[in-house]
Amino acid sequence: MQNYDLIVIGSGPAGQRAAIQGAKLGKRVAIIEKREAIGGACINTGTIPSKSMREAVMHLSGYQYQSIYGMNYRVKDKITVADLSFRVQHVIKTEIDVTMAQLSRNGIETLTGTASFIDPHTLRITNSRGQSDYQADLIVIATGTRPAESPLVPLNNRTIINSDQIFALSNIPKTLIVVGGGVIGVEYTSMFAALGVRVILVEKQPRLLGFADSEMVEALCYHLRDNRVTLRLNEEVESVEETADGTVVANLESKKKVSGDALLYAV
């Protein structure tokens, strides 16, 4: 059984900072990540991919130049999921390499697998190669978050997805239903609208982004509507189903039905 001064569970931004700070204080440190790729949700599925996708959308759609060259201007006519994914994966790989180099430079050992506690100072790591036990004086839990799930929304990793599964879409949908008017929902609504997708945004609150300044939200809603986004506020999803022809239907509590080619659940 190997012994460390500090073990950090989770290699996202919080886990990285904790591990590096411990190493700089002269401690023997290990960091555990259940994915094969280091970096947690931030690098692999969350912040970095969404911001990289935004930049790819802004460039390929020619959005920033449409006021000069007209609304029909595009850098690339038919933008595909593969076009976006290619650019995003390149950024992710670069960020992983930078993080790995930083951990290695500070003498931090990286362990791959799922960690579970045996006692307050002993962890068992399970991976494809079996199980191993490790001990540490201090253990930091920095496992982060994952997208919300609901029994009312049966995710299929194809047409009914969450924010981690954006690149599981086989093609850019013509109509997209987004459930959730928070930061993630509004962010992807804006991106797909810039690609020319007809987006229907469903939010159970009377306004988007409840924490933000009301004038800013009002201006945002104006621009979203200007990009053909339909806002359905004060509406809550009762159930979601996929029809035989592949159409996704969201049944609202108001008994209205909203249909589209795909649905993003971002509550």
Image (spheres, rainbow, N blue to C red):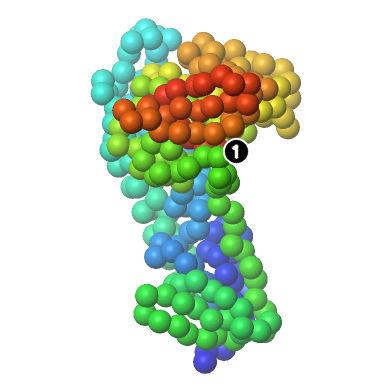
| Residue depicted at x 64% and y 68% | 141
Observer-nearest of 160 and 54: 160
Residue 192 at least partly seen: no
From this view, report whether residue 214 is shown above or below residue 149: above
Q: Position of residue 267 (x, y in %)?
A: 60, 38
Observer-nearest of 201 and 89: 201
Query: Which residue ends up furthest to the bottom in the rendered image?
Result: 1
Q: Position of residue 106 (x, y in %)?
A: 51, 73
The image quarter containing residue 206 is top right
Q: Secondary structure at mark 1?
A: loop
Locate residue 60 relative to residue 260 in the image: left or right.
left
| Residue depicted at x 36% and y 40% | 158
Q: Position of residue 120 (x, y in %)?
A: 68, 82
| Residue depicted at x 39% and y 65% | 36
Dot 1: few (<14), some (14–19), or many (≥20) neighbours within 10 Å? many
Residue 222 at least partly seen: yes
Q: Position of residue 46 (x, y in %)?
A: 50, 47
Observer-nearest of 100 and 57: 57
Q: Which residue is mark 1?
A: 267
| Residue depicted at x 33% and y 47% | 90
Number of numbered tags placed on the structure image = 1
From this view, report whether residue 67 is shown above or below residue 79: above
Question: Which amino acid does the dot numbered 1 rest on?
Answer: Val
Locate residue 246 relative to residue 152 in the image: left or right.
left
